Amino acid sequence: MAGKGSRFKDAGISCPKHEVIVDDRPMFDWAMQSLKSFYDDEFVFITQAADSPSEFLAERCETLGIDRYEEVTLTEYTDGQASTALAADDSINDSQSVAIFNIDTYVEEGKLSPEIIKGDGFIPVFETTGERWSFVKEDSKGNVVSVSEKEKISDLATVGFYYFDQWSYFADAYAEIASETKSKYGETYVAPLYNSLIDSGESVETHCLDESAVHVLGTPQDLCSFYPEFDPNNHP
């Protein structure tokens, strides 16, 4: 929720990406529907002050039944998703588990749940073609041994849900390799940070979802594929 949404602005859509209406619902609702099994947990939303998000956030959380949440508002854009997530540092204890999720992905309800989570790090994936994704590589026992960004090291792409059993795993990995990640990929993605956990001997595991249950909504073209009636030329 703290990104620029450049592809949507380039298409003439002026509202923040999470407010874009898809089949009578804002994209925020679609993303949060992915996490319905976690509604009893506390959420931290990282937002941009320029979007004036507080009223929208309060309204949508009340509608969806999300009772416990905190908003962390940024006044500048960060250099990537990992840096944006780190803005929640003051809101999360080092020992707390945390899941980071994209606001522009919809995973069908019930596919993501606490019951499937395992390991010190956990990355649900789906099998797909193409190279636009983050990818994980497993060993013969199903343990994740490498994670890449836009490098096709396997057919297993991440769904945008990144779990760390302790916040300190994420924060320490960021401190160790975020600058390297930015140098390599141009911004601070979350997925490659798992390589720091793997190198430290922590367990990183995965769970494969059906590709049909994962809907990427990151561009106007993605929205048209998901909901053919979506018209970027007829959106505020």
Image (spheres, rainbow, N blue to C red):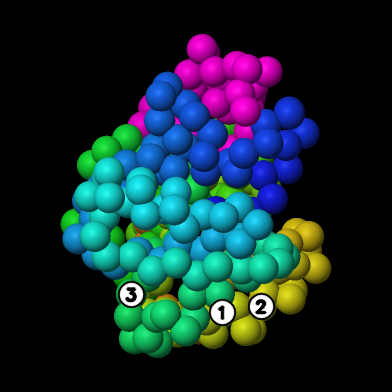
Of the residues shown, which amino acid type is indicated by label 3?
A: Ser
Which residue is disc 1 drawn over? 173
Q: Is residue 37 above or below residue 212?
A: below
Identified at 27% across, 38% down, the residue is 109
Q: Tell me the tag on residue 97.
A: 3
What residue span does the magenta drawing correspond to? 211-236
CA distance for labels 1 and 2: 6 Å
Q: Pick whichever, 75 or 213, lies toward us.
A: 75
The numbered mark, 2 or 3, whose residue comes first in the sequence reads 3
Return the x and y of residue 8 as percentages of the image width and height.
Answer: 68, 35
Question: For numbered disc 1, what is the local secondary structure?
Answer: helix
Question: For numbered disc 2, what is the local secondary structure?
Answer: helix
Q: Pick whichever, 206 or 191, lies toward us.
A: 191
Identified at 51% across, 12% down, the residue is 229
CA distance for labels 2 and 3: 20 Å
CA distance for labels 1 and 3: 15 Å
Residue 163 visible here: no
Which residue is disc 2 drawn over? 177
